[in-house]
Amino acid sequence: MALARAGADVAITYRNSHTDASQTLEQIRSLNCRALAVECDVRSEDSVRSVIHAVTAIFGRLDLLVNNAAVFESSPLEQISLEAWTKSSRPMHADRSWLREKRCPICAPLKDGS
């Protein structure tokens, strides 16, 4: 919401929480900013590509990418296996170079020309 309060148009992703995403869109739009919510599973390259296409179709470019996706594990910490922990945290540590590669062609030009 801070980005929208600063005047930015905002695209968000969600996997299962359509209702929460819709409420967030309403809040962003109430600040007179454009808003988009796209269903996405960050474990799927095709799903991420769909988000990139949707964002560029609506906004024309992508200026900032915030990745805070994770898989929710509802077991007590002491009962979570290393495999489950790795699975839950992997989306947050998605290959940043892949994300940059996919993002760069649609980035807004930086002031220094890069």
Image (cartoon, rainbow, N blue to C red):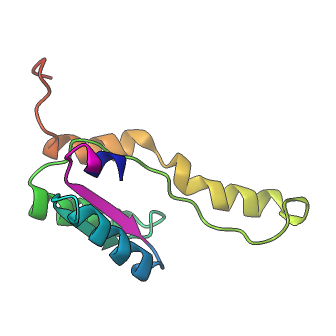
**Does 73 appear above or below 22?**
above
Direction from residue 78 to residue 73 in the image, left or right: left
In terms of image quadrants, where is residue 112? top left
- Image quadrant for the C terminus? top left
The spot of residue 16 in percent (x, y) is 48, 79
Residue at the (31%, 66%) spot, across then down: 27
Residue at the (89%, 65%) spot, across then down: 79
| Depth check, front residue: 98 or 74 | 74
| Depth check, front residue: 77 or 35 | 35
The spot of residue 11 in percent (x, y) is 27, 60
In terms of image quadrants, where is residue 42? bottom left
The spot of residue 99 in percent (x, y) is 35, 46
Residue at the (41%, 82%) spot, across then down: 19
The spot of residue 98 in percent (x, y) is 37, 45
Q: Residue furthest top?
A: 112
Direction from residue 22 to residue 110 in the image, left or right: left
Q: Which residue lies furthest to the right in this view?
A: 78
Q: Which residue lies furthest to the front in this view?
A: 30
Residue at the (9%, 21%) spot, across then down: 113
In terms of image quadrants, where is residue 72? bottom right
Question: What's drawn in magenta, residue-wise?
Answer: 5-14
Direction from residue 74 to residue 4 in the image, left or right: left
